[in-house]
Amino acid sequence: VATSFLARGWMFVELVVLLMPTVLCVALPAAALFGCALGLDALARQGELEAMRALGGRRRDLLRAPVAVGVAGGLVIGFLGSHLVPASTARLNELLSEAAVLSLAESLRPRTFTRLAEQTNIYLGDQAVEGGSTRIDDLFLSHSSPGAPQSMVFVPHARMHTDIAAQSLDL
């Protein structure tokens, strides 16, 4: 149980790290724009813009720093968007598939009916782990579709194998 808890904790940390490039691509431009607007507003409220104009300052001088920050931010966003976001999205999809397979494998409890989908139920009898798979006695699967007869399958002896690398749960 502790190993499962630690594995889930690590999976959560990895999920957060993988989401960061995408979040930064959206948040950095908005933060830069908001920061520049707040800075210029503070200068205007304190009369610094009037003082700068009175001393012969030009608007071009005032905009030099925000433009430099915008160019640097654009380069960072371009790198994130073209390199890190696709790589993190690919790994994120793998991680979510792993989580789905693990969650499904853990939700299948012995001697209980489990709803797999809206119209699909499964019943697993006794289970025993043997090697890399789980032996299942009395597997019952039912599925119904609108306008079609309900289908049911009973298997007296089955095996369940979870393959995280292939992202599959095989019965």
Image: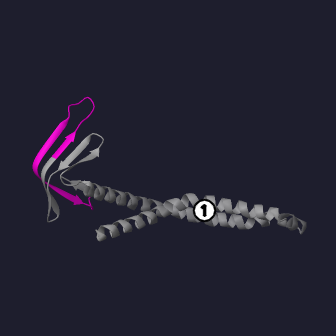
Q: Residue furthest left?
A: 156
Q: Residue at x 30, y 71 (%)?
A: 2
Q: Which residue is mark 1?
A: 74
Residue 140 horizontal/vertical position (percent):
16, 45
Q: Which of the pair 151/92 is nearer the observer?
A: 151
Disc 1 residue type (three-letter): Gly
Q: Can residue 81 be seen in this snapshot?
A: no
Q: Is residue 126 above or below residue 53?
A: above
Q: Which of the pair 2/145 is nearer the observer?
A: 2
Within 10 Å of the Cα at label 1, are there few (<14), some (14-19), or many (20+) other Cα atoms?
some
Q: Is residue 167 above or below residue 151?
A: below
Residue 121 lies left or right of residue 13; in this view the side is left
Q: Which of the pair 126/87 is nearer the observer?
A: 126
Q: Can residue 69 be seen in this snapshot?
A: yes
Q: Which of the pair 44/126 is nearer the observer?
A: 126
Q: Residue at x 21, y 46 (%)?
A: 122
Q: Quadrant of the N terminus?
A: bottom left
Residue 100 lies left or right of residue 15; in this view the side is left
